[in-house]
Image (cartoon, rainbow, N blue to C red):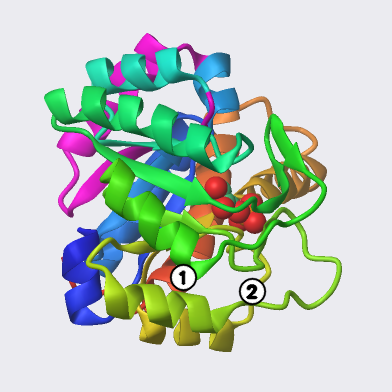
């Protein structure tokens, strides 16, 4: 999917889903838009739902989808959980050992990559440290990735996608992020390994367009979906104080989440590409 996106100069959106309803809403939006999409699960979500139960539910839903969809494990620092995900049906895992010393980051990522390869599962790696809060993982400060280190990491680990810290951050931006566009362009020009942008929530449309134009192939959106989910729930309950029909609440949430997803697919240029 990401290789096709690079070739076609569009981006594939990757949404962190939380449960059946959010997953179904993202799929509905992608099918409506005839767009490829990536369904991501954070480690906190995996732990909350149970790895096996989530795998069965998600795999069943993805396999029935009418567009190309991949199931991806986001920011996993636990080698054992990465292996379980590879065994149970995830298409791809992000092994995040970026907090470790660089040589160690390479060494442990190689281990995960070697195991994933035996299962036909792809691996995303991170170089530098992406700031902000992504469920249970919090980093106060960005440590920007360098070009040479990132190229070496790609070469030595054999990862299938690379998330360099370019100045974007997880969560809500407090100021305007200073983004190293140059690094995205240089990496995209020098390696076939697709570049992943984390911290999609709150970036301006022009920033997304520029990143994709420079060669970014996967763009992660999480916080915006959580906000939409909770806002939708609050609104429905405030407007329907007499209701005791959770299915109507769920349907309302799904419509709001699908309404969030569609504009991203259009903006990233993936609509109509499935
Ligand atoms: P946001 O929460 O800022 O959208 O970031 C998502 C992300 O990068 C998940 O890995």
Q: Which residue is mark 2?
A: 203
Question: Looking at the figure, which quarter contains the C terminus?
Answer: bottom left
Q: Looking at the picture, how far across and down is residue 74, in whole percent? A: 47, 38
- The residue depicted at 54 percent of the width and 62 percent of the height is 260
Q: Earlier in the sequence, mark 2 or mark 1?
A: 2
Q: Looking at the picture, how far across and down is residue 185, in whole percent? A: 41, 82
Q: Nearer the viewer, residue 147 or 87?
A: 147
In this image, 106 relative to 84: left or right? right
Report the magenta residues as a range: 49-77
Labels 2, 1: front one:
2
**Label 1 CB less than 8 angstroms from ligand 1:** no
- The residue depicted at 65 percent of the width and 53 percent of the height is 130
Within the image, what quadrant is residue 133 found in?
A: top right
**Label 2 CB less than 8 angstroms from ligand 1:** no
**Residue 138, placed above or below residue 144:** above
Q: Looking at the picture, how far across and down is residue 173, in whole percent? A: 78, 65
């Amino acid at each position: 999917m990401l290789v096709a996106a690079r070739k076609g100069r569009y981006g594939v959106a990757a949404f962190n889903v939380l449960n059946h309803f959010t997953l179904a809403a993202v799929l509905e939006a992608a099918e409506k838009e005839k767009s490829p999409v990536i369904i991501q699960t954070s480690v906190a979500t995996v732990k909350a739902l149970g790895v096996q139960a989530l795998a069965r539910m998600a795999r069943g839903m993805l396999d029935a989808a009418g567009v190309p969809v991949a199931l991806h494990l986001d920011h996993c620092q636990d080698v054992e959980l990465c292996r379980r995900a590879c065994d149970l049906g995830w298409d791809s895992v992000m092994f995040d050992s970026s907090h470790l010393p660089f040589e160690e980051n390479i060494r442990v990522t190689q281990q995960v990559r070697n195991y994933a390869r035996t299962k036909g599962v792809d691996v995303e790696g991170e170089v530098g440290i992406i700031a902000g809060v992504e469920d249970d993982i919090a980093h106060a400060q960005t440590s920007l990735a360098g070009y040479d280190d990132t190229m070496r990491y790609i070469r030595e680990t054999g990862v299938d996608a690379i998330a360099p810290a370019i100045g974007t951050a997880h969560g809500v931006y407090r100021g305007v992020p200073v983004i190293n566009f140059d690094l995205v362009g240089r990496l995209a020009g020098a390696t076939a390994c697709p570049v992943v942008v984390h911290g999609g929530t709150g970036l301006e449309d022009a920033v997304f367009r520029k990143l994709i134009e420079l060669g970014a192939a996967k763009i992660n959106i999480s916080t915006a979906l959580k906000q939409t989910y909770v806002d939708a729930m609050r609104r429905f309950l405030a407007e329907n104080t007499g209701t005791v029909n959770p299915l109507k609440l769920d349907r309302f949430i799904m419509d709001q989440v699908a309404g969030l997803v569609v504009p991203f697919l259009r903006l990233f240029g993936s609509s109509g590409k499935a």
